[in-house]
Image (tube, rainbow, N blue to C red):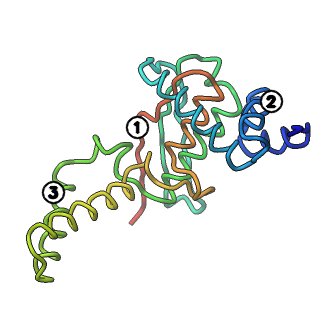
Amino acid sequence: MNITSQMVKELRDKTNAGMMDCKKALSETVGDMEKAIDLLRQKGLAVAAKRAGRETKEGLVEAYIHAGGKLGVMVEVGCETDFVAKTDDFKGFVKDIAMHIAAVNPIAVSREEVPAEILQREKDIYINQALESGKPQQIVEKMVSGKVEKYLAEICLLEQKFVKNPDLSIQDLLNELVAKMGENISIKQFARFQIG
């Protein structure tokens, strides 16, 4: 199949990947746009995994104050170099993360950071609900496990669906930026403040 410059441009607009990466992905998928997008995302995941161990000593702290001044967020996002911290793509990502946190109110960046007492409280509630419904013990355990998984996906920032594009999780967005920037990037911490 002949890969046209228009096809490459369209894929590039959808993924922000490099021109040669888009051309190669379209060639490998015989011009199938959706498969090419998936292929580029998989490559982005691989790049992110390779870079995950690198330290992120540079970065930005961003503040977002919602209209009316009754809700505010501060977020720290790290990267490896000051050069990347100054790029528009990085700054835009940090702003988007701050706005997302204001809108969705996550409890922690990742599962590992969810306080044990909050998780245990939720588990206890789910166990009681399941037992009251009269289900057998082995089914109760499966039900509770499924509900805990769903709960964690709702409260952990990296697993939440991005408010501006629900097709992507915050982790997907982060992986895309890592692939594009060519260095490790991490959401280190955040604080959300709300009046009332």
Disc 3 residue type?
Answer: Gln
Q: Which amino acid does label 1 sit on?
A: Gln
Q: What element carries label 3?
A: helix
Q: How far apart are marks 1 and 3 (CA)?
A: 23 Å
Residue on which disc 1 sits = 189
- The span from disc 2 to disc 1 (Cα, nearest Å) is 34 Å
Give the mark nearest the N terminus, 1 or 3.
3
From the image, tell me which residue sits under label 2. 19
Residue at the spot 80% in from the left edge and 30% down from the top edge: 19
Mark 1: which secondary structure?
strand
Whole-percent x, y for residue 154 in the image: 39, 59
Please tell me which of labels 2 and 1 falls first in the chain. Answer: 2
Q: Name the residue under label 3.
A: 120
Residue at figure coordinates x 51%, y 24% from the top left? 184
Q: Residues within 10 Å of mark 2 (few under 14, many from 20)?
A: some
**Amino acid type assigned to the residue bearing label 2 in the image:** Met
Q: Which mark is residue 50?
A: none
* Left/right of residue 55 with respect to residue 165 in the rendered view: left
Sequence-earlier tag: 2 or 3: 2
From the viewer's perspective, is the residue at label 2 or at label 1 nearer? 2
Q: Quadrant of residue 149 in the image?
A: bottom left
Question: Could you classify mark 1 by the number of other residues whose Cα lies within 10 Å: few (under 14), some (14-19), or many (20 or more)?
Answer: few
Residue farthest toward the bottom in the current orientation of the protein: 133
**Label 2 with label 3: CB-CB less than 8 Å:** no
| Quadrant that contains the N terminus | top right
* Closer to the camera in the image, 56 or 139: 139
